[in-house]
Amino acid sequence: MNNLLAVKDLHTYFHLRNGVVKAVEGVSIEVKQGEVVGIVGESGCGKSMTALSIMRLIQPPGRIEKGEIIFKGRDLLKMEDEELRKIRGSEISMIFQEPMTALNPVFTVGYQIEEVLKLHSELGKEERKSRVIEMMRKVGLPDPEKRYREYPHQLSGGMRQRVMIAMALIMNPSLVIADEPTTALDVTIQKQILELMKTLKREYDMSLIFITHDMGVVREISDRVYVMYAGKIVEEGSVEEIFENPLHPYTVGLLDSIPSVNIEDRKKPLKSIEGSVPDPANKPSGCPFHPRCEKAMDICRNVEPPLVKISETHFVRCHLYG
């Protein structure tokens, strides 16, 4: 199956007065048609910066230094702004983490969804309104005719997230990037949103990049998984490989920190990864995870590990498998 999207050796840096912050370093990601790819890691690992780089939404002092972002055979990094605007929102859409910052508080939600159609279609006003209301109904918004006329502050968090999903899907894009879309929601609403996205993904045969720090969500929705740490991919594989045979100590740590539903396991203290993600402006030498790694060796402190092929679909960046 051909790749819908292929990100190759992507580097995104922020040039600040006190130095260069390397937010994304050498990231390569592939997404096939109809596939759900999970990108997982703690806050500050570069997940969102990777997503914004794919959308070419990095603002100064940030800059994409090098790499390729091949979408349907064309490099987005070589496109003129006008050409890119035609693709962004129609063929590639993004669902942001916090709807209240992504939605404009002074316009109704119906108007804001309809703006996408104004930009990317030639539909008349009544056709646009009809299509927006139908999409609001599909994403599970109750009484969509009423919600169409309401403002973001009048909706609950779950409803606002459904508005964001409707906005992302209104043009039936090939690829949707969802940046932690369930983080701010309670567990019940989170489950509903995940089920909704799986249903819509099947209905529209769209590809989905799902960014999260929650390994449970990754297992629920993904076909393949990329684990990120300190701006790099440290492990990639199918969801079965990552969960049944995790190799990188960071991946193991993320999985060990998931609360268990087993009564016996719940009596044991919950494991956590000691320390925190390094400052991207001052990363440690060698493997960036070595200060937190229980299996760190001398080579880990001095030499950055290469990406090692374990199987046709499973790769890990760790000296334990060199």
Image: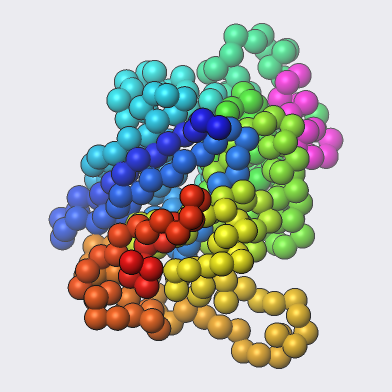
The residue at the far right in this view is 143
Specify the quadrant that holds the C terminus.
Answer: bottom left
Count of numbered circles in the view: 0
Q: Residue at x 61, y 66 (%)?
A: 244
Q: Nearer the viewer, residue 99 or 36?
A: 36
Task: Reply above or below: 40 against 264.
Answer: above
x and y, in percent, of residue 19 in the image: 16, 58
191 left or right of 314 in image: right
Can residue 97 be seen by looking at this rendering?
Answer: no
x and y, in percent, of residue 147 in the image: 76, 35
- Per the image, is 204 magenta? no
Task: Reply above or below: 188 against 36.
Answer: below
Task: Reply above or below: 262 against 113.
Answer: below
Task: Reply above or below: 1 against 79.
Answer: below
- Per the image, is 137 magenta? yes
Image colouring: rainbow
Query: Which SS does the magenta portion mostly show?
Result: helix
The residue at the far front in this view is 311
In terms of image quadrants, where is residue 33?
Answer: top right
In terms of image quadrants, where is residue 80?
Answer: top left
Q: Residue at x 47, y 25 (%)?
A: 72
Q: Which residues are magenta?
A: 130-143
Q: Residue at x 56, y 62 (%)?
A: 242
x and y, in percent, of residue 76 in the image: 37, 28
Specify the quadrant that holds the N terminus.
Answer: top right
Can residue 43 be seen by looking at this rendering?
Answer: yes
Q: Nearer the viewer, residue 240 or 221?
A: 240
x and y, in percent, of residue 132 in the image: 71, 25
Q: Residue at x 24, y 81 (%)?
A: 298
